Image (cartoon, rainbow, N blue to C red):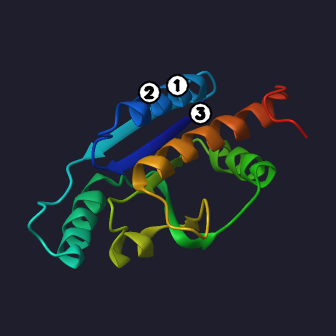
Amino acid sequence: MSKLRFIWVGKLKEPFFNEACAHYAKKLGRFHKLDETILKDAPGKLPPEDKVLREGKAIITKIRPSDMVICLDETGIEITSVDLSKRLLKWTEDPNLTPCFVIGGPFGLSDEVKNVARIKLSLSKMTLPHELARTMLLEQLYRASSILKGSPYHHV
């Protein structure tokens, strides 16, 4: 079973995001072993730029040499669910690499983190709350995995 890693900044505060993420993580867990790292938000008193830098440094410390870093960023590439399934297959084929999806806090990711990413992926050109982005990413990874297994979940 292939492995997927996630590095998230901040806990999910709203119960409905907790439930949605747990729902899709459970479904995705049928296809992949999931490894989740949740980092603490930077202190609220800091200016946004300093928060991003501090959170970025924390993210960098959690990236492993075997991680293939995929950052979620509104400036990243947009792909279809079918394209994601094809990429996911490629990303999980190498037993020495683990796809590692990174979502920053409310103010995004530092340039340092974006620069170590092999891929910057956008779920939408619109700005999304990081809790919603987390939910959408898990759902899309479940959808991509379902496509690869020939499950009827994705209607084409």
Quarter holding residue 111: bottom left
Residue 103, numbered label: none
Quadrant location, the N terminus: top right
> What residue is at 43 percent from the left and 72 percent from the top?
114
> What residue is at 91 percent from the left and 40 percent from the top?
156
Label 3 is placed on what type of residue? Ser
Quarter holding residue 151: top right
Q: Find numbered disc 2 in the image and state the secondary structure of the residue it sits on.
A: helix
> What residue is at 68 percent from the left and 43 percent from the top?
93
The alpha-carbon separation of the residues under discs 2 and 3 comes to 24 Å
Residue 23, numbered label: 1
User: In the image, is 52 to the left or to the right of 123?
Assistant: left
Label 2 is placed on what type of residue? Glu
* Residue with the mark numbered 2: 19
**Mark 1 crowdedness (10 Å alpha carbons): few <14, some 14-19, many ≥20:** some
> What residue is at 33 percent from the left and 61 percent from the top?
106
* Residue with the mark numbered 3: 2
